[in-house]
Amino acid sequence: MLPTLFGFPTYGLCFFFGSIITIVTGIFLARRHGVDKEIVIDSAVIGLGLGMFGSRLLYVIENWSWFAEQPISAVFRLDQGGVSFYGAVLFNVPGLLIYYRVKKLPTFKMMDLFAFSVPLSQFFGRLGCFSTGCCWGSRCEEGSTSAAFAVTFPTETPVWVSHVVEHLGMEKASVEEIQAALPTLPAALQEGSWPVLPTQLYLAGAGVLITILTIAMMRRPHREGQVFAVTIAALVAARFLIELVRADSPAILLGLSEAQWISALLFAAAVALYIWRGRVGRPMPAPLPDAVDPNPAPAPTSPPSTS
């Protein structure tokens, strides 16, 4: 739980280093599949730009009751966390599809090639969530089995504010009300949040495993579009399960949260995509060996001999 690191917002650092690692990894994979690095850079700019915009937009919409009472500048305070993973997916995937269509690139091959960036972005994004204390898990009672995995967050983090407001028996509270109530809080709550499950780290771990799975699948022959489908299916399945122990995602229908309903719909779509591409998708061969240049320079021609 480090809101700042080396004087910079930790969330922003996670986004920066995540972007760099994603681009470098994308260039490496693209080279082995005969794709120019310029396409990787363009894809990164479009994907990261639309992803950040969409993730923040959906978060603001979901929490509009709070943002409506804040200065307009609060909408742009990304250093305090507050993004929606599904908002990023719903914006950057269509944006990249349009870009590949306009450039007349093999759309599903490109989606397979850059599928790794989705779970990798989740890894860095959830580390950012953990640093700011948002997207937290269920409270762990002392002596319970889950208490061994629990963490506490410092004061002024979103999870701490939520626990204070809950303790006061209020739906929401102003900064002044929270400060006035501090002396009356239990000693443990004055020092930080109640112990909770670190669901941010669960999602980060899932992002690493799915990234490895995606890259491993790209090393084997498959039908174009199937790697992307498996990646999305694995991501949303993990999200659906981890939502069961999230504390900041209330149920909206039939006991399921908004994220779980989106997960269920995306899982069904990913399964349908996998089956469809398995029937009509073009075979995508294994990548070129590392030592092979996919775009070799033309061999020099010798001048014609004279007689």
Image (spheres, rainbow, N blue to C red):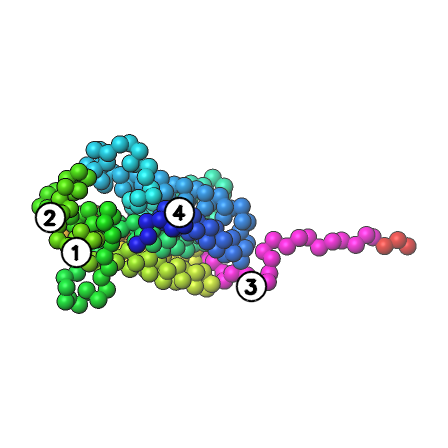
Tag 3 residue? 289
Look at the numbered disc 1 and give the secondary structure of its residue.
helix
Q: Residue at x 47, y 39 (%)?
A: 102
Q: Nearer the viewer, residue 17 or 261?
A: 17
Compare marks 2 and 3 and give the one earlier in the sequence.
2
Cα distance in 3D space between marks 1 and 3 = 57 Å
Q: Do the numbered discs 1 and 3 sit on residues whose CB atoms are within 8 Å? A: no
Question: Quick check: marks 2 and 3 in contact, CB under 8 Å?
Answer: no
- Rendered image: mark on residue 223: none
Q: Helix or strand or loop: what does disc 3 sit on?
A: loop
- The reply to whether the C-beta atoms of the residues labelled 1 and 4 are less than 8 Å apart is no
Judging depth in this view, the residue of 292 and 222 nearest the camera is 292
Query: First in sequence: mark 1 or mark 4?
Result: 4
* Residue pointed to by mark 1: 188
Residue 91 at what x, y percent from top left? 35, 42
Gap between marks 1 and 4, in whole Å? Answer: 28 Å
Q: CA distance from mark 3 to mark 4?
A: 42 Å
Percent across and percent down for residue 147 are: 19, 64
Q: Which residue is mark 4?
A: 7
- Circle 2 sits on which residue? 184
Q: Magenta residues? A: 277-304
* Magenta stretch contains residue 284: yes
Could you give the CA–CA distance between mark 2 and mark 3, rounded to whole angstroms?
Answer: 66 Å
| Upstream in sequence: badge 3 or badge 4 | 4
**How many residues crowd mark 1 within 10 Å: few (<14), some (14–19), many (20+)?**
few
Q: Position of residue 298 (x, y in %)?
A: 68, 53
Q: Nearer the viewer, mark 3 or mark 4?
A: 4
* Mark 1 vs 3, N-terminal side: 1
Q: Is residue 305 left or right of residue 114?
A: right
